[in-house]
């Protein structure tokens, strides 16, 4: 097996690694986006809930105020948890992007090496063929 073919096998493996890293990046990006949407929905719901309470002009009993305040605190806690999860996913997305970039750079470098080896092999083959043709022509001329 020629050097270029052996190197191509390695490049093919690097391409598979790059594709796997890209799929991982896509998956964690989708997870992050989903958590971001959930957090935005929670924030929007909280804002709408508070606006509804303040604009209704309704009189509340003390127990209703406590219940409402507890609900608002639960919403705020949920938003904080979503933010923590989002921050964590952001870090994971950054790491996945770095890994994908490294795999892509490695694959591209291996592809260039393969192309150079193939080009060198073609040049060597062309030279050998030319030498053979020159030898045949010289032998024919000497006869």
Image (spheres, helix red, strand yellow):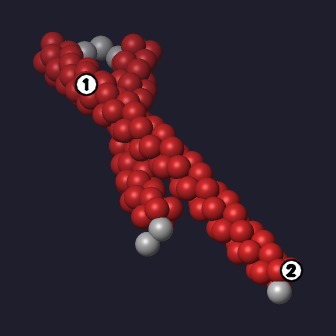
C-alpha separation, residue under disc 2 versus residue under disc 1:
85 Å
Q: Residue furthest front?
A: 143
Q: Is residue 10 left or right of residue 4?
A: left
Q: Is residue 11 visible?
A: yes
Provide the secondary structure element on which disc 1 rests: helix
- Residues under numbered marks 2 and 1 in contact, where contact means CB atoms less than 8 Å apart: no
Vertical arrangement, residue 63 with respect to residue 31, above or below: above
| Of marks 2 and 1, the one in the foreground | 2
Q: Where in the figure is residue 16, as x and y percent of width and height?
A: 41, 59
Q: Which residue is mark 1?
A: 84
Locate the C terminus by quadrant: bottom right
Relative to 59, say whether 37 is above or below: below
Q: Position of residue 104 (x, y in %)?
A: 48, 44
Q: Furthest residue to the right?
A: 141
Horizontal placement of 95 versus 142: left or right?
left
- Relative image position of residue 100 (x, y in whole percent): 42, 42
Residue 126 lies left or right of residue 104; in this view the side is right
Q: Is residue 23 visible?
A: no
The residue singled out by tag 2 in the image is: 141
SS for callout 2: helix
**Residue nearer the viewer, 112 or 125:** 125
- Please, is residue 71 above or below residue 9 in the view? above
Residue 81 screen position, x and y as percent: 23, 26
Q: Quadrant of the N terminus?
A: bottom left
Pick whichever, 55 or 103, lies toward us. Answer: 103
């Amino acid at each position: 097996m020629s050097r270029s073919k052996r190197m191509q096998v390695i490049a093919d493996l690097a391409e598979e690694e790059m594709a796997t890293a890209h799929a991982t990046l896509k998956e964690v990006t989708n997870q992050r986006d989903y958590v971001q949407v959930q957090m935005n929905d929670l924030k929007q719901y909280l804002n709408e809930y508070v606006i509804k309470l303040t604009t209704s002009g309704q009189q509340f009993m003390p127990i209703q105020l406590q219940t409402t305040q507890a609900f608002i605190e639960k919403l705020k806690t949920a938003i904080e948890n979503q933010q923590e999860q989002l921050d964590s996913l952001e870090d994971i997305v950054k790491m996945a992007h770095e890994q994908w970039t490294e795999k892509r750079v490695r694959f591209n470098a291996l592809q260039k090496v393969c192309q150079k080896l193939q080009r060198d092999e073609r040049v060597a083959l062309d030279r050998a063929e030319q030498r053979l043709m020159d030898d045949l022509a010289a032998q024919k001329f000497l006869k």
